[in-house]
Image (spheres, rainbow, N blue to C red):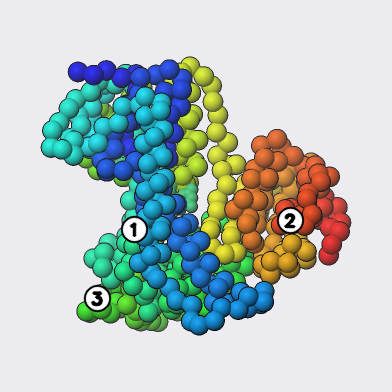
Amino acid sequence: MTQYDVAIIGSGPGGYVAAIRCAQLGMKTAIIEKYSTLGGTCLNVGCIPSKALLDSSHHYEDAVKHFSDHGIEIPGEIKVNLEKMIGRKQTVVDQTCAGVKFLMDKNKIEVYEGVGSFKDATHLNIAKNDGSTETIEAKNTIIATGSKPSSLPFINIDKKRVITSTEALKLKEIPKHLIVIGGGVIGLELGQVYKRLGADVTVVEFMDRIVPGMDGALSKELLKVLKKQKVKFNLSHKVKSVTTNGDEVVVVADDKKGQEVTFKGDYCLVSVGRRPYTDGLNLEAAGITMEKNGTIAVNDHLQTNVANVYAIGDVVRGAMLAHKAEEEGTMVAEILAGQKPHIDYNLIPGVVYTWPEVAAVGKTEEELKEAGIEYKTGQFPMRALGRARASMDIDGFVKILADKTTDEVLGVHMIGARVADLIAEAVTAMEFRASAEDISRMSHAHPTYAEAVKEAALAATADRALHI
Ligand SMILES: Cc1cc2nc3c(=O)[nH]c(=O)nc-3n(C[C@H](O)[C@H](O)[C@H](O)COP(=O)(O)OP(=O)(O)OC[C@H]3O[C@@H](n4cnc5c(N)ncnc54)[C@H](O)[C@@H]3O)c2cc1C
């Protein structure tokens, strides 16, 4: 029986990063993945393919709607070749997954293709995809089995007309009318893809706001901009049935007054969140306990109740984000090597890759109010930037929340062009516990979108933004 210092179940961003870090630290490492491609949700059916389609559809929208503003004229009709667009996305996915396989080989990590499950706390059974089975011994195991789309109990996801994000990434036709249940990140990103390609898109959301959990000002601004892009929103609507009739999908909901509303479309994307995935792991055999919400119970060191078993990523508490899973993978590897790593969960940024993009780190205004922390606000609109006017991306703003007494930056909330990249400055500043004045005194290249960060910091420091 082959023995390992560490075996990792699941090859998503949590699992494969943990594997690389374990190998770097000199551990004999194995990774078990049930699919034939490595990379998990993120690379196969999540972050990467969704961004590939967001980019392609953005180019199309620019060509149709914005090129002429720049004096670029395209004779004839501009058409979408959806098959080619989806094909390009798949090429990007294939290349990225192959990159993970390359990294496994480079770091001499043994890859097992099959379903991993616990025989006991130090032995794992692998039901291999070629039909054979193998048992390996692992001093330590890291569970990184991720998550799956969740649904509502009364919805039958037929994967044809009533779909999850996975099917939405490989549709064979552009929907005429896509009904999106759930106004969170995934629903809005994929909704925007198909809106740009010509679909009517209707979002039905239970809460009274979109992207719940983000700062209220971001929700409001994103709603305003997406409405301008003709996405329809029905907030405070409780969906109570989804049925299909041939090519038609009928969604029935109660609005906030309790009145029944019916939506008819040809596709319905159910994007009501994701659930931790532990099916088939046989956790009981190792005596591993779970939380009521289906996550694996872990302590601050991501250790389960069984001392040599750890769990990371979407399958444990916290934000379901690829970069959070990666940090946790690194952390567990370093703990196993006897180091003392630390993750500041407050400083894990959240991003929505719609256009304009939305990005945030630290506390929201709502959280600061609830905690009774006195704060000051500095906000700067993108439209006041020369860079934004040059590119005609004038929607959005940067908002900085700083402690009223110490001026320490407590939260940064952005909406606008390229803010998914811009948020890294805020994370860096907050990691070093910068004050708003610190940011305001740093030189920011001109003309850039980043100048909005400096201006918002000036506004927060002493209400002295320069360009407004
Ligand atoms: C459409 C979409 C877009 C997204 N966009 C973003 C984004 O832009 N940014 C971001 O940060 N996050 C994004 N996410 C979320 C991100 O994909 C997840 O947070 C991330 O993949 C979690 O990583 P993980 O390693 O915990 O698990 P996963 O990536 O889910 O990987 C788990 C792996 O474990 C395997 N597995 C499960 N059980 C077993 C078993 N018993 N044996 C062997 N293998 C097993 C699975 O097959 C899978 O490959 C997106 C998600 C979706 C669906």
- Amino acid type assigned to the residue bearing label 2 in the image: Thr
Q: Crowdedness of circle 2 by 10 Å Cα count: few (<14), some, many (20+)?
A: few
Residue drawn at point x = 37 percent, y = 55 percent: 90
**Local secondary structure at mark 2:** loop
- Amino acid type assigned to the residue bearing label 1 in the image: Thr
Q: Crowdedness of circle 3 by 10 Å Cα count: few (<14), some, many (20+)?
A: some
- Amino acid type assigned to the residue bearing label 3 in the image: Thr
Residue 373: x and y in percent read: 69, 47
Residue that numbered label 2 is attached to: 448
Q: In the rendered view, would you say 79 is above or below 271?
A: below
Of label 3 and label 2, which has the lower sequence position? 3
Residue drawn at point x = 45 percent, y = 61 percent: 53
Is label 3 in contact with label 2 (beta carbons under 8 Å)?
Answer: no
Cα distance between the residues tagged 1 and 3: 19 Å
- Residue 216 visible here: no
Residue 109: x and y in percent read: 35, 26
Cα distance between the residues tagged 3 and 2: 48 Å
Residue drawn at point x = 26 percent, y = 32 percent: 112
- Quarter holding the C terminus? bottom right
Residue 407: x and y in percent read: 78, 44
